[in-house]
Image (cartoon, grey):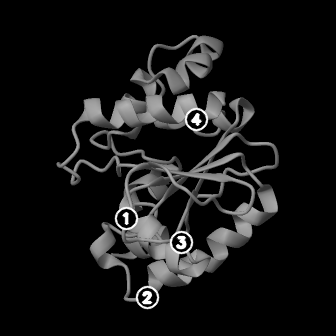
Amino acid sequence: MGATRKVESRTLPDLLREGLDIVFVGINPSLYSVAQGHYFARRINRFWPCFSRSVLSAPVRRALGVERLEPIHDLRLPDFGFGFTDLVKRPTANINDLKPGELAAGADTLIAKLDRYRPRIVCFHGVTIYRSVAPVLGLATADFTLGLQRQGIGAAALFVVPNPSPANARFTPADQTHWYDRLAEQRAK
């Protein structure tokens, strides 16, 4: 229990800076990811395999000389225009461990970060994030679909992909990769 408490008092650092093309926004870091010190560190999470199969990551993989990106590469991605942050920075074993109101409370902090760093595209990993942030921004949730949203966050385009958690069984790894490929199309515009 002492080790868990120690991890809970830490979190993953934001990997943000000015000039990023895409900032990936997760719900919150897992205890495991924080212990490892990298985003999406659990092997069963589909982010790294699906991102690695997508055309979005091709320039990064070529530059690093790897076929597949791994969690250890997260620290290198800002050099290639990709950043990472979370709606809620408090790590938990799963989303059900978040307190009521924590998602909504994280929206203001997230928006302030995005206003400060001004990425070209903000990519939410999952509908849960969109539904938590949309009311703060005055965005519609009634006709929501994945992909590019009609309204952005400041000057940044807003793009929503499925959550890469294996608990999100509604979408296959092929579906997840497809959405990263669509994000690559948006980045190229």
Few, some or many C-alpha atoms within 10 Å of disc 3 (few <14, some 14-19, many ≥20)?
Answer: some
Q: Which mark is residue 17?
A: none
Few, some or many C-alpha atoms within 10 Å of disc 2 (few <14, some 14-19, many ≥20)?
Answer: few
Q: Distance between the residues labelled 2 and 3?
A: 19 Å
- Residue type, numbered disc 4: Gln
- Residue type, numbered disc 1: Asp
Answer with left or right where residue 162 lies relative to residue 23: left
Q: Distance between the residues labelled 4 and 1?
A: 20 Å
- Residue type, numbered disc 2: Gly
Question: Residue 126: x percent and y percent?
Answer: 39, 57
Residue tagged 1: 143
Q: Which mark is residue 139?
A: 3
Q: How far apart are marks 2 and 1 (CA)?
A: 23 Å
Question: Residue 63: x percent and y percent?
Answer: 65, 14
Q: Which of marks 4 and 1 is in front?
A: 1
Residue 73 in view (yes/no) = no
Q: Which of marks 2 and 1 is nearer the N terminus?
A: 2
| Number of numbered discs overlaid on the protein picture | 4
Q: Nearer the viewer, mark 2 or mark 1?
A: 1
Q: Which of marks 2 and 4 is in front?
A: 4
Q: How far apart are marks 4 and 3 (CA)?
A: 20 Å
Q: Earlier in the sequence, mark 2 or mark 4?
A: 2
Which quadrant is the C terminus positioned in? top right
- Residue at image position (53%, 26%) is 56
Residue 45 in view (yes/no) = yes
Q: Given contact means CB atoms under 8 Å apart, are the residues at marks 4 and 3 in contact?
A: no
